[in-house]
Image (cartoon, rainbow, N blue to C red):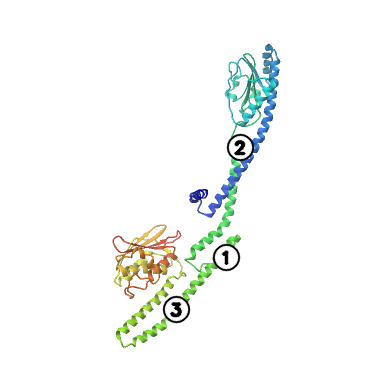
Amino acid sequence: MKAERLRRWRRRLVPLLPRTLRGRFVLIMIVGVLTAQLASYTVWTSQVRSSQLEQLDELSRNIAYSVASTMRFFRSLPYEYRHIVLDQLRNMGGTRFFVSVNERRIPVQDIGSGPEKTLVVDNFREILTRELNIDDVLVEFSRPETLRVYNNEVLLHDLPPRWGQHSLLMEPLSPPILVVQMELGPETWLYVATLLPVPDLFNEYRWLSGERLLASLMVLLTVIGLSLLGIRSVTRPLARLSRAARQLGDDLDAPPLRETGPREVAATAVAFNRMQERIRDQVDERERLFSAISHDLKTPITRLRLRAEMLDDPLQRERFCASLDELDLLVKGALASVKGFDLHEAVEPVDPRVVLQELADELALQGGTVCVSGHAEPLAVKPLAFKRCLANLVENAVFYGRRVEVTLKDSPERLAVVIRDHGPGIPETQHERVFAPFVRLEPSRSRNTGGSGLGLGIARHIARAMGGEIALANHPEGGLEVTLHLPRPSNVTAL
């Protein structure tokens, strides 16, 4: 079940990945750097937080003991002396604590949350309860601008500066103020306010400061820049190999690849060069073999033809000569198919409409009717192979339909040549079979009826060598519709 779920997620993620190897390398580097930084920040934040909690624990305990001492001091004073001591403290500018005696508990807008506040509050309550033997201790945090300090709930900012602002305000910072209130007696509350010298006490996102984000961004950009330079040098040989593989079908005589780069890339280039050399040798050997067979068969065919002419029976002589003509046609067709597969022709820009119009004029002399419509920009192809491909398709259409309509459909991506005849069509089950060599759906083996059965096969091979394809379909109104699709490279130049 888990494996199936993993495969589904993988299928969903694959379309979102970059299409190029360079893009995927960059994505891996970005994800790796971000993951490493996130992990390092997590560890760093955990260590800083643990260290800060230890410091805060020690600091809060020390201040709690100081508050307990202050509380014992005021509890030991007679009631009528407490206000005298408070006035003296205010006249001196205050101490590290702001102390007041109130008739009731002053409401405080408590702020903050998290383990830091819990630690401080628990330490104060524990120490004050233990040191002073009291149970009712209120420990809260307040912002300076909302802190109220006296019975009439006057704000801290409304007091004279010497009455506590020196000990509780740190301009321009505004740290939270710790407020402790304990009951001294009936309707008498001791009010103690102080600062904890801990920056960003309640800032939960302090580890995402602007400086750290800027540093992370600089590290990420540096890694991506260096990665792009390195990945480009690594993927450049692969790009050359990809271009060479695309051009292999068009030009077997292309220069070999440079066998340089990393060990794996160099080994791939060596294997590719060896494969190209073997393919070139096999193609040359096939051409020499077919040429030799064709040449060697011409002599016995000619000899048999001479002997056939010496036969006395006219009917036998005619049948014998017809068989020799068919044999000669098969030999020429085989040799023509090899020449049609020739890959050594140079690529040139060719106007498809001009080529089709020339074929239409030639077939018009033989009684065929070919109408050419549409317009197309010049296409970079091998001229003779391209003309042979169109000639086989158009001649086949004229042979079976007599009247042929050729339509050019051009676009920046590809060229489509639609050839429709008005013949009997081809059953859909036979659409692939007719491309096989020497396959003729017409039962006659006469040159004037059945042909040699090589035309469509040669045309498809030439189309595929140019990166295209040939598709067959029966037209709804009758006849066969042959569509030649050829890709249009972006760097084709006009004639």
Q: Amino acid at mark 1?
A: Val
Count residues near mark 3 (Cα–Cα under 10 Å), then give few for <14, some for 14-19, many for 20+.
Answer: some
**Is residue 96 in view from this perspective?**
no
Q: How many marks?
A: 3
* Residue pointed to by mark 1: 270
Answer whether labels 3 and 1 touch (C-beta < 8 Å). Answer: no
Q: Amino acid at mark 2?
A: Trp
* Residue pointed to by mark 2: 207
**Based on the displayed image, in which of its 4 quarters is residue 108 positioned?**
top right
Q: Of tags 3 and 1, which is closer to the observer?
A: 3
Q: Quadrant of the C terminus?
A: bottom left
Count residues near mark 2 (Cα–Cα under 10 Å), then give few for <14, some for 14-19, many for 20+.
Answer: some
Which sits in the foreground, 265 or 372?
Answer: 265
**Is residue 396 in view from this perspective?**
yes
**Based on the displayed image, in which of its 4 quarters is residue 204 positioned?**
top right
**Distance Cα–Cα, label 3 vs label 1:** 34 Å
Q: Position of residue 267 (x, y in %)?
A: 58, 63
Residue 293's disc is: 3
**Distance Cα–Cα, label 2 vs label 1:** 53 Å
Q: Earlier in the sequence, mark 2 or mark 3?
A: 2
Q: Position of residue 153 (x, y in %)?
A: 58, 18
**Distance Cα–Cα, label 2 vs label 3:** 83 Å
Answer whether labels 2 and 3 touch (C-beta < 8 Å). Answer: no
